[in-house]
Image (tube, rainbow, N blue to C red):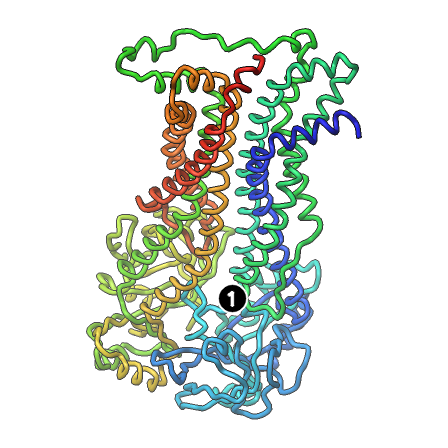
Amino acid sequence: MRALTRKLLRNVWQTRSQGLAIGLVIAAGVAMFVAYFSTFDSLRLAQRTYYDRFRFADVFVTLKRAPLFVADDLAAIPGIARVTSRVVVDVALDIPGLIEPASGRLISIPAREQPVLNEPFLRRGRRPAAPDEILASEGFAIAHNFVPGDTVTATINGRRRDLRIAGIALSPEYIYSIRPGEIVPDNARFGIFWMEQRALAAAFNMEGAFNDASFALMRGTSEPEVVAAIDRVLARYGSLGAVSRANQLSNWFIENELTQLQTMGFVIPGIFLGVSAFLLNIVLSRLIAVQREQIAALKALGYTNREIAAHYVSWAIAISLTGTVLGVLGGIWLGSSMTTLYNDFFRFPTLRYMLAPAIVIEGAAISLCAGALGAASAVRRAVRLPPAEAMRPEPPARHYLTWLDRVVPRRLAPPAVKMILRNLQRQPVRAGLSALGVAFAVAILIVGMFSLDAIEVLLDVQFNVAQRQDYTLAFIEPRSTRALQELAHLPGVFAVEPVRAVPARIRAGHLARQTAITGLMNGARLQRVIDSSLRPVPLPGDGLVLSRKLAEILRLRAGDTVQVEFLEGARPIRDIVVAALVDEYMGTSAYMEIAALQRFMQEGPRVSGATLLVDRGDPNELYRRMKATPAIAGVSSKRAAIDNFRDTIAQNMNVMIFFNVLFSSVIAFGVVYNAARISLSERSRELASLRVLGFTRAEISLILLGELAAILLIAVPAGLLLGYALAALVVLAFDTELYRFPLVVSVRTFAFAAVTTIAAALISGLVVRRLLDRLDLVAVLKTRV
C-alpha cells in the first residue's frame, strides 16, 4: 500500500465523526434527487405504457347529439387516424350506506371487445353482457367495497334503475378521476361506469346517435388545425368545443404533478449539496492547516503538487461516496414510499417503483462534483504552500483591539463572552457561512410546513367567503326558474340562488381559452365573486369578470374587449368588455351577471343549477328528496368537499413534512457539529490552558458552545426570512391554471421551524460537549503550535 493511501485512510478515520456528519448532508441531497426523479420516471413510464396499450386519444369533444354517420365525416378530416364515437351521460346515484347524493358518469362501450380509443382495462370480473350490467371504476368500487355482482341504483332518464356490476375497470381517460367543479378526487361520491352501447343509447333515446367522440391523430398532424376542423363539422350538433390531450382534465393533473416532481428534484437537492460543499471546504481547510508540516515533508520527499492535491481531494471524494451510497439507499426507500402514495391518487393498471441506473450515476456525479468543488479552494492553498514556509508553524492570528473592546466596558462583559465575540469577529466569513447553512435548515422546514397554512386560508376563502352555500346542484338540462321554487320547498332549505353556467370559448387576438362562463345574481349571498380584500365584486350589466390567471393566459387587462363564442344553444358570438379582474385560488373562471348572460344567449330566464343554504339539522330527508328528483344530475356538498380535501392533502403532506423535518435536522446537525469540532480543534490548546488556569468545564464549554449559540442567534432569524422568501418562490412555481396558493406563513410554522432547528443544534452541541469533557490537558499542551 502506498504511503499516501495509508495517510488517506488515517485521515478518514481521524475525521470520521465530521465526515459522517457531512456524509449525512450529502446523503439527504442524493436521496431527494433519487427519490424525485425515480418517482418521476416510474409515473412517466406507467403513463406512457397505459396510454399506448389502451389507445388514449389525442383530441376529445362533447356535443349535444349527432347522427352516427357524422362520425364518417369526422374520420375524413385530414390528419385523423381513428374516431371513436360514444354516448356519455352523467347520472345521479343512490348508494347503499351513503346518505348523501352521489353522481356517476355512464360511458358506452361496444358489446364485444374491439380496438377502440380510451379502452377500459378490466381489473376484475367480465364485460357487460346484459342491458343492466356495467363496469365500475376501481376507485369507486374500493371506496364502497363493491365487487362484481353488487348493484348500484342510478336515475336514468328520470327513472330509477338498478345496475349490476359485472366487472371492475380502469381507463386511461380517468387516471385522475375528478368530478367537474372539484379540485381533488372523491371516489365515494363520483364514479365512472361503462355500459354496453345499445343499452345506454336506448336508455337515453340516443339510438343511431352519439354525444361524445375521441380522436387519434396521425404523426406530424397540426393539432390546432384538426381541432378547428372538428369544431366546424360539429358546430351544428351542439359541440362544446374540441380539446386536445394537453387540456384533458386527468392528463392535465398528471402532467402538472410530473412538472412539480422535476422542479423539486432540482431545487431541494441543490440546497443540500451546496451546504455539503461548504462543510467539506471548512473541514478540509482545517485539516490542511493542521498538516502543514506533513505537506512540506511530502514535497521535500519528491511528491508533486498534483499528487498532494489528489490526496486531499480523495478525502472529500471518500466522504461524497459514503454519502452517495447512503443517499441512494435512502432515495430508493423514499421513492418507493412516494410511488405507493401516488397509487392512491392515480389509477394505473401497474405503477411500480423503478430506479434507472442513469439516475444513480447522475446522483453520484452531482455529489462527487459537490465534493470536489468543496475541496477545490482548500486544496489550492495546500499545493501553493512553499515547503520552507510550511515547515514553520502557522503564524498565530494577529490580535488587536476590536470595536467590542472600545465600546463595551471591561467590567460589563464577562471574559468568556468577550472571547466568544472576539473569535466570531476575527473569523466573520466562517461564522457567516455556518449561519447560512443553519438558516437553510430553517428555511427548508418553513417551505415544507407553510403549505398547511396556505391550504387553511385557501379553504376558508373558497368555502366560507366566496362559496357560502351548503350544496351546489347541477341540472341535467337547463331549466326555467320555476325549478328554484321547487328547490325552495325542499325540507330544511333556507335560501336558493340561481346559477347559469355556459361553456364558451374566449378569444383575445390569436389566443383562446375554453372555459365556462358562470352567471350569478348581482348581490348574491351564497356564491359570490370577491376581490383580493375579500369583498364582493359587483357584476356589471354587460361585461365580463375574469380571474386574474385567465386574464394572464389571454394577456388581458381590465377594459379590453374579447370575443366570446358561446358553445350552447344558438351558439352566438359576442364582443364583450372585460370589466374587472379578480384573484382566485382555484381554476380559471369567468363571470357575468345572470340576466346579461341570458340576454347574450338569446334565451329566457333559465338556470343550469342552483346553490342552497340549508338547516344544520338532520339532512336525511333532504338527501332522499334530492335523490328522487330526476332533473338533478349531481349534488356537491361543501362539507364533503372540505373533508375530502383535508383527507387527501393530509395524507400527502404528512409524508412530506416528515422528510422535511428529517433532512432539515440533518443539515442543522451537520453544520453545527462541524463548526463545533473545527472550533474545538483550533482552540484545544487555548481551552486546555484555561482549564489549567482554573476555569471549570462549564466555563470552557460556555466559551466553545457560546459561539454556536451566537451563530444560531443570527441563523434562526435569517432562516425565517429566507424561508419566507423561498415560500414566495414556491408560490410562484406552483401558480398553475388548476390552483394557486396564497403566501401565508403562520407564527406556528415559524416557531416549529425555529424550535426543530435549535433542537438539532442542541443535540450536536451535547455531542461536542462530551468530547470537550474528555480533553487530555497534558497531551494538548504538549502539542507544538
**Residue 419 coordinates in the image, percent (x, y):** 39, 17
Position of residue 106 relative to residue 693, above or below, is below
Q: Amino acid at mark 1?
A: Asp
Residue at 40 percent of width and 66 percent of height: 181
Mark 1 Cα-neighbour bin, 10 Å: few <14, some 14–19, many ≥20? few
| Quarter occupied by residue 362 | top right
**Residue 779 coordinates in the image, percent (x, y):** 55, 20
**Residue 696 coordinates in the image, percent (x, y):** 38, 23
Position of residue 336 relative to residue 415, above or below, is below
Residue at 55 percent of width and 69 percent of height: 347
Residue nearest the observer in this picture, 564 or 386: 386
Residue nearest the observer in this picture, 271 or 178: 271
Where, quadrant-wise, is the C terminus in this rendering? top right
Total labels: the figure holds 1
In the rendered structure, the answer to whether residue 328 lies left or right of residue 633 reads: right
In the rendered structure, the answer to whether residue 599 lies left or right of residue 87 reads: left
| Residue that numbered label 1 is attached to | 344
Residue at 53 percent of width and 38 percent of height: 271
Does residue 91 appear anywhere in the picture? yes
Position of residue 33 relative to residue 177, above or below, is above
Does residue 232 appear anywhere in the picture? no
Mark 1 lies on a secondary structure that is loop
| Quarter occupied by residue 527 | bottom left
Where, quadrant-wise, is the N terminus in this rendering? top right
Q: Residue furthest bottom?
A: 130
Residue at 54 percent of width and 72 percent of height: 234
In the rendered structure, the answer to whether residue 76 lies left or right of residue 715 reads: right
**Residue 197 coordinates in the image, percent (x, y):** 57, 85
In the rendered structure, the answer to whether residue 403 lies left or right of residue 142 reads: left
